[in-house]
Amino acid sequence: MSKKVALVTGGSQGIGKAIVDTLSKDGFAVAVVARKKAKIDKVVKDVNANGGHAIGLIADVSDRDQVFAAVKNTIKKLGDLNVMVSNAGVAPTTPIDQVRPHDLQMTMNINLGGVIWGIQAASQAFRKLGHPGKIINACSQAGQYGNPNLTDYGASKFAIRGVTQTTAQELAKFGITVNAYCPGIVKTPMMKDIAVKVAKNANKPVEWGWKQFSKNIALGRLSTPQDVANLVSFLASQKSNYITGQSILVDGGMVFR
Ligand SMILES: NC(=O)C1=CN([C@@H]2O[C@H](COP(=O)(O)OP(=O)(O)OC[C@H]3O[C@@H](n4cnc5c(N)ncnc54)[C@H](O)[C@@H]3O)[C@@H](O)[C@H]2O)C=CC1
Ligand SMILES: CC(=O)C(C)=O
């Protein structure tokens, strides 16, 4: 039997790479989509060396045409599409006085635009292929609870939670589910950059920056990318078939809803 196919944006590092590895172990053929060829190639090579089946595609998710092209090329090269993971994102540190139009638009175009184009492209593909599908979006605990110093980012993530709810209702009649994962504080290049910048803005050491985000985690540790990939694995599986429109926290107990 041929493998089910997943597409993961921002799959070249951090949480996205853990999702690629995990879905590959779950038996999916995976399209790794990001902007930098060298990084994509390395992830693809590792997956294929470990017995999986991955291909790499370059796309900027803020560009609608490029997202549609990535979906089209995934189907052309891997023969199908069953799961779309819109994981790519950016997180500029923006205390309110530092918010500027360029950063705000860039953050919205990548984080929110990337998710909307992903939902559009994947849901149209599922309908054309004539089968159900699963759409999984990257949200954040910062999309459930406002985090100081992250105005642009928080706005984009709150919006993703809304779009996940609206599109889940629109697309349910086609057998398409739409859900999101809301990580807490995950040890990735993105989070390191935030901790460094928050500390620098306050003229404090970098450890202080990390502590601003990590002091209220009930389970007492930062998250690994694998913690998040485990939730995505569930959302991509048949076990989640009766769940749609949800933005699920995977934060070790930071935000309680
Ligand atoms: N690290 C954390 O603590 C948390 C991360 N998240 C979310 O999880 C997702 C992944 O985050 P991390 O792995 O930490 O980030 P990261 O910065 O380590 O990796 C982000 C990935 O997205 C790609 N990317 C960025 N802009 C892109 C664009 N325009 N087009 C295509 N690819 C693009 C990057 O090349 C990279 O592969 C993001 O959506 C982020 O907002 C949510 C909550 C917490
Ligand atoms: C980067 C992020 O999503 C945080 C701090 O929750």
Image: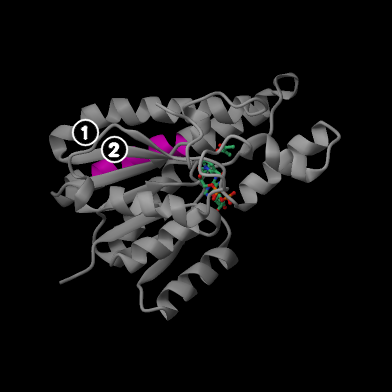
Residue 109 percent across, percent down from the top left: 53, 33
Q: Residues within 10 Å of mark 2 (few under 14, many from 20)?
A: many
Q: Is residue 241 left or right of residue 215?
A: left
Q: Is residue 62 on the magenta stretch?
A: no
Q: Label 2 CB, ligand 1: below 8 Å?
A: no
Query: Residue at label 1?
Result: 171
In what quadrant of the picture does the N terminus appear? bottom left
Residues drawn in magenta: 113-124
Q: Is residue 251 left or right of residue 82?
A: right
**Which disc number belongs to residue 180?**
none
Q: CA distance from mark 2 to mark 1?
A: 8 Å
Which tag, 2 or 1, sits closer to the chain's start?
1
Q: Is residue 32 left or right of residue 210?
A: left
Residues at circles 2 and 1 in contact by the CB criterion of under 8 Å: yes
Confirm whether residue 80 shows in the render: yes
Q: Which secondary structure is most common in the magenta stretch?
A: helix
Q: Residue at x 37, y 38 (%)?
A: 180
Residue 202 percent across, percent down from the top left: 82, 31
Task: Name the kind of residue labelled 1 in the image.
Answer: Leu
Residue 143 percent across, percent down from the top left: 49, 29
* Picture quadrant where residue 22 is located: bottom left
Q: Nearer the viewer, residue 163 or 75?
A: 163
Q: Element type at marker 2? A: strand
Q: Residues within 10 Å of mark 1 (few under 14, many from 20)?
A: some
Q: Residue at x 59, y 67 (%)?
A: 38
Q: Nearer the viewer, residue 102 or 65?
A: 102
Query: Residue at label 2?
Result: 178
